[in-house]
Each structure stands twice: as C-alpha cells, then as structure tokens.
C-alpha cells in the first residue's frame, strides 16, 4: 500500500510546486501533468496601429451567433482590442477590461470581464468571464423573444413594451436603493478542445448556446494551444540541455547509490567503493596504455639536437664504425691542441 501511495504523493507534491509558479493564462493538469498555455492565442493590443509581430491579428476573435441575430467578439485572457466607448450597465473605468461583447440594435452588451484563470474539470479545459452587462428582467426577455418569433403582433408588442417599460421603471426605482451586487450579470463560458491540425496561434471559435434567460453564453474553441504539452524552462534549455540535466541526475544517482551499496553491503573501502570498480580500473589502464603509445609515437617525430651523442656514421654502421669516428675526432682535437 505504501509503495502505491508514495508515487501518488510525490506526483501531487510536484504538481503543487509547479502550480505555485504558474503565470497568468496557464495551468497544469492535476492528473496528467500536461501544461496548458493560452497566451499564444490571446490577441495583443496594437501599438501605433501595428501588431507585435508580423503574423499577429489586428482584431479580436469573432463567433457567429446564427439564430440569435447577432455576432460575438471575444479574446482569451485579455480584453478585446476593439475600442468600446459605452456598454450597457458597465462603468466607464471597466470598459477597457471587457473580454467578450455583442451588439444589439446599436447598443453594446458586455458578456464578461477579462480573466486569466483557467479551469479544468475532468478532461475539459475552460475559461470563464463574469460581471458583464446586467441580465434582462423576465418581462423584457419574454418581450424580445416574442417579437423575434412573431413579427405580426407588433401592436400587441407595443402595448406590452409600454407596460414593461413602466414595470422596468418601477423595478429600477426599487433596486436603486439596493446594493449593485444583487444584480444578475451576463457571463461567458469558453470550452477549449485540442486541434492538432490548427496552426500555432490560431483558434476556431463557435457559438454553442445561451441560457434561457440569455444571461450565460457558451462557446467552444478549438486550438493547438488546448492540446497541452511540456513546459519549456524559462532559461530556454533546448532538447540537448534537458538531456544533459537528465544525464547528470542519472550519473549522480548511479555514483552515490553505488558507493552506498559497496560501503554498507560489500564493506569496501578506498577506491573500491566506486560502483563497478574493476570495470573502470580496466578501462583506465587501457586508456593509460593508449596514451603512452601516442606520446611515444609523437616523441619519435620530434627533431633532436646534433651533438656528441649523434655523429655521422658510414654506410657500414655498427659499433666499429662509431668507435673509429670517435678516435678520429680525438686525434684531430689533439693535433689542434699541439699546434
């Protein structure tokens, strides 16, 4: 039982340490350990009407609403880059933080403020935006739905609209004295799916549905960024660097574990504590012999100084010829000394 719990505990500890060092818009899967980074599909704002890179987008992501009668504009983990001067129910200082919105009859409605917190439930990766424009009251929602479904009842809708407006005014007066936290606001849920065929930095977003009260909007985004992978170290280590680190760790474990075994179990001392000492000793001796052979071969090729140790010899060779040369040289020196 302990052998099973130990790896699970170590893996949980490892993932918790990694999660503590997460950057915005990134997350580790608690089970598989895969690393997800949606910053690659987040559209960055334009600087002097230019994108950060040559392949960057000049507008936020769009999704067609089909039967809703409107289209949606949204971004990932960042506000939309379009300029929004006004949105229903959103204060002016929060307009620059809108991450998703749509336009209806000339008015813009926010469906969520920017958020960089990713959520994993089971195998699903999602991103949630909240604190959008206030949700429609039931009477207003029913009126819009009725008008959208049956255009032939405009007179009745006009009367209902007048009545609903009166109700909305009364409701607004009653709610004005209450805290703004009690107001239900629009929100967005983006479910992300892996798409291996999608180019890097691209995403395909589709509108799924909305809640019956049109207060929560659901989207599905397919992108390569949702496939997950291994986090690249901040130091920028490549494949060679990662392999080197793994090799160093392996050698350290081999060396320390072998020394501990040889010392405690085999009762070895000195150099014999090293693991596989006989093998390494044989290899060392072989390398030593090779070094001696190479150095001796190189020494023969080195030029030598001329002197008494090396005298020209006749073609006959041998000790006799060398002795005659030495005698001749001695006689010559004696004659020079007598003169």
Image (tube, rainbow, N blue to C red):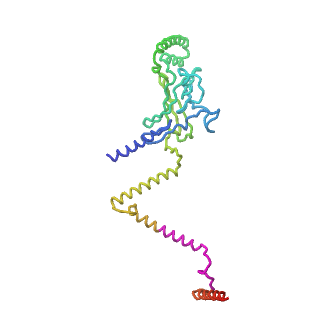
Query: In the image as oriented, which residue stretches furthest toward the right?
Result: 339
Compared with 152, 200 (above or below) is: below
Image position, residue 247 (x, y; %): 47, 54
Image position, residue 48 (x, y; %): 65, 33
Compared with 76, 329 (above or below) is: below
Quadrant of the image occupied by residue 261? bottom left
Residue 331 lies left or right of residue 268; in this view the side is right
Residue 22 lies left or right of residue 6; in this view the side is right
Compared with 110, 266 (above or below) is: below
Residue at 55% x, 16% y: name it: 151
Image position, residue 75 (x, y; %): 55, 31
Q: How many marks?
A: 0
Residue at 57% x, 72% y: name it: 299
Residue at 63% x, 83% y: name it: 312
Image position, residue 138 (x, y; %): 47, 17
Residue 307 inside the magenta-drawn segment = yes
Residue 71 inside the magenta-drawn segment = no
Quadrant of the image occupied by residue 182? top left
Quadrant showing the C terminus: bottom right
Residue at 52% x, 44% y: name it: 234
* Pick the front one: 298 or 171: 298
Compared with 322, 78 (above or below) is: above
* Pick the front one: 81 or 158: 81
**Which span of residues is magenta-colored?**
286-314
* Pick the front one: 194 or 270: 270
């Amino acid at each position: 039982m302990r052998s099973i719990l130990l790896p699970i505990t170590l893996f949980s500890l490892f993932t918790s340490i990694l999660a503590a060092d997460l950057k915005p818009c990134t997350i580790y899967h608690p089970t598989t350990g895969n690393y997800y980074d949606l910053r690659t599909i987040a559209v960055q704002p334009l600087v002097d009407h230019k994108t950060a890179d040559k392949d960057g987008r000049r507008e936020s992501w769009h999704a067609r609403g089909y039967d809703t009668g409107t289209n949606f504009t949204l971004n990932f983990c960042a506000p939309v880059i379009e300029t929004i001067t006004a949105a229903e129910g959103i204060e002016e200082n929060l307009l620059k933080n809108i991450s998703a919105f749509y336009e209806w009859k000339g008015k813009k409605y926010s469906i969520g403020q920017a958020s960089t917190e990713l959520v994993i439930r089971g195998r699903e990766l999602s991103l949630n935006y909240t604190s959008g424009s206030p949700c429609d009251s039931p009477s207003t929602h029913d009126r819009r739905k009725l008008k959208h479904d049956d255009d032939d009842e405009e007179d009745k809708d006009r009367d209902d609209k007048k009545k609903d407006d009166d109700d909305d005014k009364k409701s607004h007066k009653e709610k004005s004295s209450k805290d703004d936290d009690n107001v239900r606001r629009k929100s967005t849920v983006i479910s992300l799916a892996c798409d291996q065929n999608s180019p890097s930095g691209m995403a395909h977003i589709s509108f799924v549905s909305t809640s019956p009260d049109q207060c929560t909007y659901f989207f599905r985004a397919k992108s390569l960024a949702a496939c997950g992978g291994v986090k690249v170290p901040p130091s920028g280590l490549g494949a060679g660097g990662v392999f080197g680190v793994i090799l160093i760790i392996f050698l350290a474990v081999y060396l320390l574990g072998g020394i501990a075994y040889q010392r405690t179990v085999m009762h070895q001392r000195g150099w014999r504590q090293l693991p596989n000492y006989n093998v390494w000793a044989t290899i060392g001796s072989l390398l030593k012999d090779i070094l001696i052979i190479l150095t001796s071969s190189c020494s023969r090729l080195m030029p030598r100084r001329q002197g008494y140790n090396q005298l020209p010899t006749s073609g006959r060779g041998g000790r006799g010829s060398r002795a005659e040369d030495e005698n001749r040289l001695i006689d010559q020196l004696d004659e020079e000394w007598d003169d």
